[in-house]
Image (tube, helix red, strand yellow):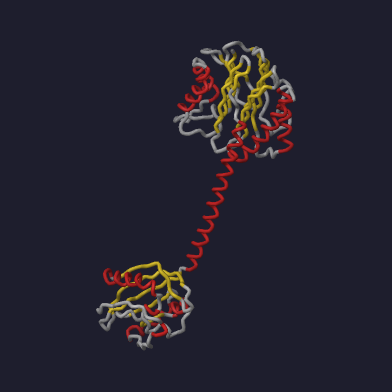
Amino acid sequence: MPNVNIETVEESTMPKVNIETPDWLCQMQSILEELSEGVVIVDDELRVVFANEALIRMGQYERGEIQGRMLDAIFPREDLPYIKRLYESGQRYGQYRSDFYIPRKDGEKVPAIFNGRVIQGPDALQYRLLTVTDISAQKRVEEQLRESNSLLEKRQREIEDELALAARVQQSLEPKSLVWGRLRVEAYYHPVCTIGGDFGLVSPLDEQHLNLVVCDVSGHGIGSALVANRIYTETVAKLRSAAPLPDVLRQLNHFVMQNIDTSVFFFTVAAARIDSDARHLAFAGAGHPPAMIVKPGREPRLLESRSMVLGALPDAVGQETALEVSIEPEERIVLYTDGLTDVFNARREMLGVEGVREIVRESSLLPFSQMKQGILSRVAAWRRGPPADDVSLVIVEVR
């Protein structure tokens, strides 16, 4: 076979070359014309000896315009080195496959897949049989997907920026640690997502009373966080009115049922109000895990919720809702959300209220400054895997 040297030849200066289709190829022509894929056969000098109708339509040529041309008169100069490498690959391996293009008569490039094979003709000459598959529709879809992905990535970045801002805003809902008279307060909040549906509140009502609230809105993420933010604002307003805690719960329940779609969200609350002399505590809970009062090393007392979850039923808060209890020096008051109780170990056993109660008893032996971390560490040791729910925790020490 001759050593073909591909040189750039301008179409306008290219001489007319008349090449007759070999007889053996004429016998196959009717079959090749029936194929939906483009077919082109070139001789050992890379001259086109046959192109079927599908390939001619693909390039928008007239019948006979391709016959006899060399590839360097069809493809632009800058692509000839690549074509030469394909040619050499065919020489070496006998066949090749390439994602390339077919140049149309008007200069537009039609994306295509070329499958090439060296064949031996009955005339003892070597030819290259190329099947050409138009993939322009596929390329358009790929481009549309790239554009869509780019838009999605941009929107994802915007959402992440918005969530980061929302997380910073929600940090204002975290219960704050403080010292208030004879009371010391330690608080903790951790959302399972970037933002969550829990919130805590540690707020002096006046010089005589300290309010403690822990709330848990159902669900996770943006919806729960928005509802929690709205309930937080309403809770602050109700507490400032100095209303009794059962009235605060009734008003919150009424507000949510009137203003928020209660078929989607409900919430639970534990609220406590401590006098400035730190000897008396009022408590009201709605569907919430029981608060606990513990003296170091002793079994914690439970303060059970006497109302149902809020946001679902208009009469969720009953008449006998409030608890009034005495507290003593060295006692510690623990309010928390079910992110502590509703955790499971490797045997799928739930920690539950009794499990948390035992952890509180054990952790009460620690110095008060270490008790919060003691509770969280023991719960994490029980739990299998990362947290699955938001966690809020407020601990108060009576001095």
Residue 46 horizontal side relative to residue 143, left or right? left
| Nearer the observer, 230 or 246 | 230
Where residue 391 sits, quadrant-wise, is: top right
Instruction: Decide if residue 28 is in sight here.
Output: no
What's the residue at 56%, 44% (across, down)?
A: 161
Task: Report which quarter residue 35 is drawn in.
Answer: bottom left
* Residue toward you, 346 or 391: 391
The answer to whether one can see residue 388 in this image is: yes
- Answer above or below: position of 361 versus 266: above
Of the 4 image quadrants, the one containing the N terminus is bottom left
Q: Position of residue 248 (x, y in %)?
A: 72, 26
Percent across and percent down for residue 372 are 52, 22
Query: Above or below — where is 170 with respect to 76?
Result: above
Left/right placement of residue 155 relative to residue 12 reads: right
Vertical placement of 157 versus 170: above or below? below
Figure quadrant of the C terminus? top right
Residue at the location (59% across, 14% down)? 398
Q: In this rendered view, identify the residue nearer to me: 12 or 127.
A: 12
Image position of 123 with respect to 285: above or below:
below
- Count of numbered badges drawn on the protein: 0
Residue 293 pos. (x, y %): 59, 16
